[in-house]
Image: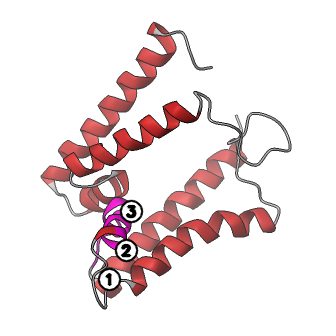
């Protein structure tokens, strides 16, 4: 077992939790990525966009800083020396998947970070249902792709 990966996951989870608590404690906002990015892109609320831009820049700059410090990004590429490999299913499939994720976050009124991290912490029944739905869909997708379509590792 690779303890390093487990510790990195634990550290990442703690940082996500701390950032969600900090955002709620300081601004009274929920750290749901789809809501933060969506309202930044579509509505541009006056006086409310600075923290959204800072949050998104933090999401982008964190991995870049880790790479600059030599930490790497973990197992995200198929070959040694690559930072990010080509999409496993091709660019077209990735575009369709991205659109489906966008539709899903719209239908579910949020994403895994908003419902799974923040909503569950607030004991929201709606977030519990949404998170269970996310998990069941992910489990079914992995089963279909790996066992019925014969793909994956």
Query: Dot 3 lies on which element?
Result: helix
Assign the magenta stretch its main secondary structure: helix
User: Which secondary structure lies at badge 1?
Assistant: helix
Residue 21's place in the image compared with 93, above or below, is below
Q: In the shown orientation, is residue 18 left or right of residue 84?
A: left
Tell me the number on the disc at residue 131.
Answer: none
Residue found 71% across the figure and 70% down from its top:
65
Whole-percent x, y for residue 119 in the image: 25, 59
State the image coordinates of residue 13 (x, y, percent, origin top left). 50, 58
Q: Which mark is residue 21?
A: 2
User: For the point 13% across and 51% down, which residue is it?
Assistant: 125
Taking the spot 35% from the left edge, 59% from the top edge, the residue there is 34
Q: Tell me which label, 3 or 1, sits earlier in the chain.
A: 1
Residue 25, numbered circle: 1
Label 2 Cα neighbours within 10 Å, binned few <14 / some 14-19 / many ≥20: some
Quarter of the figure with the C terminus: top right
Q: Residue 97 occupies which quadrant of the picture?
A: top left
The residues tagged by marks 3 and 1 sit, at their Cα atoms, a distance apart of 17 Å
Q: Which mark is residue 33?
A: 3
Where is residue 126 drawn, in percent x and y?
A: 14, 51
> In front here: 147 or 101?
101
Q: How is the image coloured?
A: secondary structure
Disc 2 secondary structure class = helix
Q: Characterize the local packing of mark 3: few (<14), some (14-19) or many (20 or more) Cα atoms within 10 angstroms.
A: some
**35 falls in the magenta region:** yes
Comparing 13 with 60, the one in front is 60
Q: Give the range drawn in magenta.
A: 29-41
Tag 2–tag 1 contact (CB < 8 Å): yes
30 horizontally vs 67: left or right: left
At horizontal 62% and vertical 29% (from top left) the residue drawn is 88
What is the CA distance from the residue labelled 2 to the residue labelled 1? 6 Å
């Amino acid at each position: 077992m690779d303890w390093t990966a487990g510790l990195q996951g634990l550290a990442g989870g703690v940082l996500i939790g701390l950032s969600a608590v900090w955002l709620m404690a300081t601004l009274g906002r929920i750290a749901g990525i789809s809501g933060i990015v969506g309202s930044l892109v579509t509505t541009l609320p006056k006086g409310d966009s600075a923290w959204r831009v800072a949050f998104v820049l933090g999401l982008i700059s964190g991995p870049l800083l880790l790479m600059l410090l030599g930490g790497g990004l973990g197992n995200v590429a198929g070959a040694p020396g690559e930072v990010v490999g080509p999409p496993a299913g091709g660019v077209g499939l990735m575009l369709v998947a991205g659109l489906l994720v966008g539709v899903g976050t719209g239908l579910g009124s949020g994403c895994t970070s908003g419902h799974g991290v923040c909503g569950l912490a607030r004991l929201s029944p709606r977030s519990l249902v949404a998170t269970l739905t996310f998990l069941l869909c992910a489990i079914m997708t992995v089963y279909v792709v790996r066992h019925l379509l014969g793909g994956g590792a």
